[in-house]
Amino acid sequence: MALITKAVKGTQDILPADSYKWQHVERVIEDVCRAYGYKEIRTPVFEHTELFQRSVGNTTDVVQKEMYTFNDKGGRSITLRPEGTAGVARAVLEHGLQNGALPLKTYYFTSCYRYEKPQAGRLREFHQFGVELYGASSPATDAEIICLANETLSLMGIKNLHLEINSIGCPQCRAKYHQALREYFSAHTDKLCATCNDRLQRNPMRILDCKSPVCKEIASNAPVILDYICDDCREHFDSVKANLDAVGIEYTVNPTIVRGLDYYTRTVFEFVSGDLGAQSTVCGGGRYDGLIKELSGQDVPGIGFAMGLERLMLILDAQGIEIPNPNICDIYIASMGEKAANKAFEIVTNMRAEGFAAECDLMGRSVKAQMKYADKIGAKFSVVLGDNELETGKAVLKNMADGTTCEVSLDNELLETIYRFQIDSELANFSDSFADENISALAKGLIDN
Ligand code: HAM
């Protein structure tokens, strides 16, 4: 019985009282994506297992230990997506989008599934906002992608984030680096876990993001890729940094970032927050110029990132960032008796058509109970309809916040009064925000020009 009423370990519900926060975050993201010219893509929640093996990589923790894989009734091996990049790459190729207008700019919101040990900020079902760009290999592209992530986070009001960047080179520089890693880790084979011993020959870079504390300790003194990258990759990296400098985005070069997925080449980056505890990375991404080649043989560069939305919510909470709740009921029309209930139903229907959030009784409750409900849902105004109000066509409109009342006729006057109130409060909010120094300066600049 307990199983039926308990969510699966590592999953969580987003309840009606909190969903407006997610909607707000999604709206901010959609606005930023529109400004940068990115269009939404939606791909299936499951794909052929081989897609993730080939793209994310057979020697990664994600593929080796964390995927939800099963055979469907037709005997196909299917995997719930552990991340969004592979599915988008598959969709791009399936629909030939790489042959259309380039660069191709996409964004998505997805649920992802990884069988990890759940803890704060680490779930088995989690959600990502991601972007993927195809067709452009210039360093300015890397900078644009980082700007987009940076702007999204700062428009949410998030502070104290650190951007860390690195270059993990191309397959040419990687060969020399792999050799150096093999030499280094060969001296520690007795202490490395079995998976990392296997990785030593197949893909020694993966040892650098093993979660075992012993492997982590050994990896902390391993050679770093930045000492091995070729001239082309270094020039690319320098140019990315120059682009970031030009737009004033602060970053630290962290030569130990290698990312946990195999498809990355050249620029990789992470936004980390001190408000997240052990799972400090809220956003991670990088360039993947070899991914499309690996899947189809065609040479199409790509770059992207993904943000963990649960981690974003944790930061918003930790930093006390208030999100405006748009779900407040504008008016509750209470009623006594059947005739009044019918009139209330008619009025709320009309008010909804005018764009107001309006509610009336659906449970045949007493006026007292109806008003209690109106209070609970935070209605801004209320009206009580009875025989008298139906006869005179007038009712008392109550402002629930301060208790003030005024008499209004039940036709347009009710609507106009609430409408005026909305405008007045929006004007008040607007002048409050004008008190903000930056906005005043911006407004002054606009007026001066
Ligand atoms: P990732 O670093 O594996 O990259 O995940 C991106 C973000 O998803 C992380 O920074 C984190 O915020 C969130 N995340 C990852 N695992 C979990 C989890 N178990 N629970 C909660 N949040 C989690 C990727 O997924 C790449 N596909 C990103 C990318 C897109 N690179 C290029 N394009």
Image (cartoon, rainbow, N blue to C red):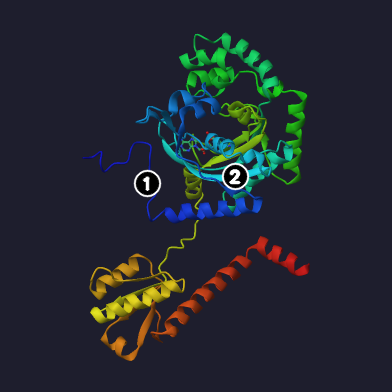
Q: Please report the residue visible at 46 percent of the width from the left and 28 percent of the height from the top.
A: 49
In depth, the one of 198 and 135 nearer the eye is 135
Total number of numbered discs in the rendering: 2
- From the viewer's perspective, tell me whether residue 142 is left or right of residue 214: right
Mark 1: which amino acid? Asp
Q: Compare marks 2 and 1 and give the one earlier in the sequence.
A: 1
Locate the C terminus and report the quarter of the image it occupies: bottom right
How far across and how far down the image is residue 433, in percent? 60, 65
Give the residue at mark 1: 13
**On the image, which quarter does residue 144 sit in?**
top right
Proximity of marks 2 and 1: CB atoms separated by less than 8 Å = no
> Of all residues shown, which one is farthest toward the left?
1
**On the image, which quarter does residue 393 sit in?**
bottom left
Q: Is mark 2 within 8 Å of ligand 1?
A: no
Is residue 188 positioned above or below 81 on the image?
A: above
Give the residue at mark 2: 106
- From the viewer's perspective, tell me whether residue 390 is left or right of residue 281: left
